[in-house]
Image (cartoon, grey):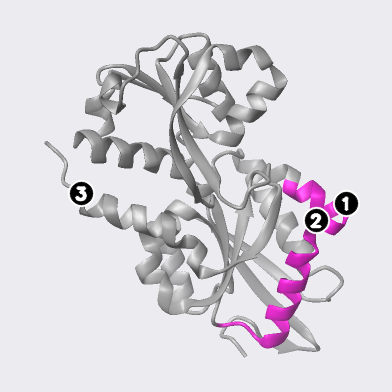
Amino acid sequence: MGFNTWSFADTQHISFAYLEAGLKDLNDADRHVAVQLLAKELIRDSGNEIKVFPLNSMAEMLDMIEVGKVNYVIINSYLYLTGRQKLQPFLTDEIWGIQRAQEAKENYVLVVAQDFNYQNLQSLLGKSISIHKDYLLVNFYLNYLVKKEAKLPINKFFKRIKDTRTDSQAVLDVFFKTSDSCLVPQYIVDLVAELNPSVLKGIRIVHYSGAKFIPALVLRLKNNSVDTSNMIRNNLLTLSDNARGQEIMNLFSIKSIKPINANALQDMIKLYDEYQSMAVEK
């Protein structure tokens, strides 16, 4: 029996924690409601109780994990990358990948106007870029690209970095030439083009990251009973099979939550470790 999964009168008490910084696409009220609904759906018809902890920092999450107050974690993958060394001793090998599109991994693309004279990344030195900074992995990949190719921080490489409200707005900024470039998941370009086919005539993709990124994860900690683990696993597997589950995924703007192998994280881990080792000009 885990530290925080105890049983009396056949009732198990389970706790989920999430970092609010990784779910900024939702406003405060929607974010908490969505996570609460997800948690309740994962114990549906079981008679068990579940508590959700919205946390402000990785340090706060680690403190709760270390004293056994958390059984499952919902975490943005970028925050997982930054804290994985400290998280690892408490994690099992059960990992769930949260997908925003049909593909298991996202491909990030650099987009410029069709008539922009792009030769390589240096062509954007002193230019402008639009990016939805709340997509933490996209923001990380932009920092990685610029650090690797120009050995500069992005605020010294670009003349202007526009933080857009959505990824689709970043694409439209390039189309309407209010920004020279944008970095977005490829499925966002496809979605914008589907809604407005003329957009493709005004933009072009000049860089592909390749399918490497899983935006968010559900992690099972070691302090779980077998019964709890089986229940949560079965309910995650069938989440999309009912109307309530579909509504919850719509709240999060996600397509699915699927079990993944730890090896599926290696592309992101390799990029992050490479980024950490790169020098940058002051």
Alpha carbon distance from label 3 to label 1: 47 Å
Rendered view: 4 above or below 109? below
Residue on which disc 2 sits? 240
Q: In the rendered image, is residue 166 in sight?
A: no
Lower position in the chain sequence, tag 3 or tag 1: 1
Q: Amino acid at mark 1?
A: Ala
Look at the numbered discs 2 and 1 and tell me whether their residues touch, using CB distance below 8 Å.
Answer: no
Amino acid type of the residue that numbered disc 3 sits on in the rendered structure: Met
Q: Amino acid at mark 2?
A: Ser
Magenta span: predominant SS is helix
**Do labels 3 and 1 touch, CB within 8 Å?**
no
Query: Most extreme residue toward the front, as rendered?
Result: 119
Task: Find disc 1 in the rendering and name its residue.
Answer: 243
How far from the left and from the top, in percent, is residue 32?
65, 50
Q: Is residue 84 above or below residue 209?
A: below
The span shown in magenta is 223-249
Which residue is labeled 3 in the image? 278
Identify the element where label 2 is drawn. Answer: helix
Horizontally, is 139 left or right of 257 in the view? left
Which sits earlier in the primary sequence, circle 3 or circle 2? 2
